[in-house]
Structures are given as structure tokens and as C-alpha cells.
Image: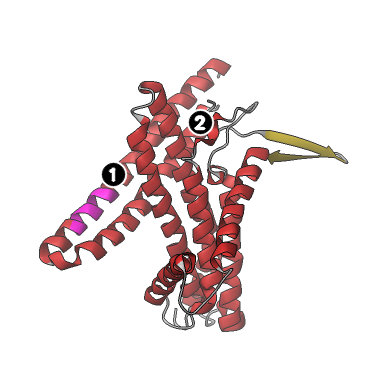
Amino acid sequence: MIEGQISQMAHLGAGIAIGFGAIGAGLGIGFATKGLMDAVSRQPEVAGKAFGFFLLGAALSEACALYAFVIAFQLLGK
Amino acid sequence: MSEAGHWIYTLSTSGHNYTFNLDTIFTMWFAMAVVIIFALLATRKLSLVPGKMQAVSESILKFFWGTLDTMMPNKNRQHVPLVASLFLFILTANLMGQLPLRIIHMKTGELASPTNDLNVTGALAIIVLIYYVAAGLKAKGAKFFLHEFSFTGIVMALVELLEMVTRPLSLAIRLFANVFAGEILISIALGLYAYFLPLPIMLFELLVAFIQATVFMMLTIAYISSASSEEH
């Protein structure tokens, strides 16, 4: 391919990478929130403790989107 | 403002080129100095009735003891030095990113948190790898690598060898990507609507700094615990 086309395709690939990465992280944080809501509605007294675990899990699943972000950023530099 | 670039210095000696990210080195020493000075001030005049500094540092130490107690069943106090210094260093380093150090102008790059460099987070992750392998070897000897001689035992040993690569990799990239993405997000918001839109994102980054330091510490404790516990 020509030089310009490679750069265009790399930009397209960056968009695709961050898009698919965001799907997984969004699903993960959604499930984590659902679990938090279930736990708090069943036992409102554990709300504080459950929120701490929720933040941990949300950070762990958000990291998956950030892996995709790093890949996308590498592609943008191409 | 360049987007989280680095001030790279190249040293050529005897045919080899060594590159140094000078801004990262400077900010890392700054974070280390903050932690060391805090530790020296906290332990200067120890007494049975704690002063202000001593009370703060004792409550910080109690936080680490509580976390270790909930995540590791026995013999957990010996891991406090590594875990506490990792947490305090990463927290200081992440919070440094919100200081107005960027107004100091440099040729390329900018002064921000040192954890926006993959080299720093990679070094921290390799320290964790060496520590938990050493803890496993100390607790179980050669049985840490070799389980019973059967099909599942061999597969488990191979999977654990693979984990020795993937665990530090995910630790390093998680911390690096969170801090780096935060800085990119702030600079994009600064371009959209200067001075007002970045403020809530910077507040969110303070929360992210705490959460990522906690996540790094928790995963370190979990790895050490799974390496040195008896059953598998």
C-alpha cells in the first residue's frame, strides 16, 4: 500500500480498537453495578463495604478498555 | 502542551545508545523524596502517647494491617514493607499528576506523574514478580514450580509459568494506561473548553489515583498470598 493509505488504515484501526474495547468494559461495569444494586437492595447495611468492592471491580474491568486505548494510541502514531 | 511526551536524552557510549526519560526520572525522585521525608518526619520523635504526625502514620499502618489481615490468612505482617511502600509511592506519584508542574516549560514533554511512563510501572511490576516468586520458593521450595507428576500437574505448572509473564504485564499496563488516559483526557478537555471542563475530570483523576494505588496493592497481596499459601 501507499504511505498515506497505511496511515489512514491505522487511524481506522485505532477507532475500531477503542470501540470494541469499550464494549467489553461497558458490559463489565454494567454487570458490576447490577451486582452492587442487588446486594444493596437485599442488605442495605452492607452498602459501604460493597461499594468498595464495586470500585475495585469497576477499576479492573475499566482497565480492559484502557488496554485498547493504549493500542489505539500506538496505532495513531503510525 | 505536548500530549504526555517525554524529554528524552540519548547517551552514546561504546557503540550503544542509552535513552533516558529525564522528566520521568526527575518526577520519580520527587515522589520518592516526598515519601522518604514523610517517613523520616513520622518516625522522628516516637513516644507512647502519639503526636500528630505519629497518629497519622499509625492509622496508615493500621490500614495496611487490616487489608493484609482480610486478604492473607497467616504470617502476613512480614509483607508490610513492600506493600506499604508500593502503595505510598504509587499514590504520591499519581497525585503528582494534578500538581501544576506543567507550567515549567521544557523543550519536549512535560512534568507530570512518573507513572505515565511504562518504564516506571514495568519496574514496579517486575519487583512484585521477583517478590512473589521468592515468597513462593521460601514457603514451598521447588514444589512452587513442580506440582505432582501427572497430566494436570504439568499443565498447572505450565499455566503458572505463563502467569509469571501475564501478571506483571497486566499490572504494569493497567497502572500506566489509567494515568496516561487521564492525562490525554484532560488535555482533550482543555482543548474543548479551556479552564472549566478539565476541572471535574481532574477531580475524577484524584479518585482514580487512589483506586489504582489500591488495585495495585490488592493484586500484589493476592499474588503473594496465592504463591505462599499451602493449598493450590
Q: Residue at x 52, y 49 (%)?
A: B93
Q: Which residue is drawn at 61% across and 53% down?
A: B33
Residue A72 % position (x, y): 46, 34
Question: Which chain letter goes with mark 1?
Answer: A
In the picture of the structure, the residue carrying the numbered disc 2 is: A75
B157 and B175: which is toward the camera: B175
Residue B201 shows in this picture:
yes
Secondary structure that dominates the magenta span: helix
Measure the C-alpha gap from mark 1 to mark 2: 22 Å
B201 and B31: which is toward the camera: B31
> Earlier along the polypeptide chain: callout 1 or callout 2?
1
> Which label number is shown at residue A26?
1
Q: Which residue is drawn at 41% across and 22% down?
A: B191
Question: Which chain letter goes with mark 2?
Answer: A
The local crowd at label 1, few if under 14, some if 14 to 19, many if 20 or more residues have their Cα within 10 Å, is some
**Mark 1 falls on what kind of element?**
helix
Magenta stretch contains residue A31: yes
The local crowd at label 2, few if under 14, some if 14 to 19, many if 20 or more residues have their Cα within 10 Å, is some
Magenta region: A28-36
Residue B81 % position (x, y): 55, 70
B209 and B53: which is toward the camera: B53
Between tags 1 and 2, which lies in front? 1
Q: Which residue is drawn at 15% across and 61% down?
A: A40
Above-or-below relation of B146 to A65? below
The amino acid pointed to by label 2 is Leu
- In the picture as drawn, the residue positioned furthest to the left comes out as A41
- How many discs appear? 2
Residue B173 shows in this picture:
no
Above-or-below relation of B105 to B153? above
Magenta stretch contains residue B96: no
The amino acid pointed to by label 1 is Gly
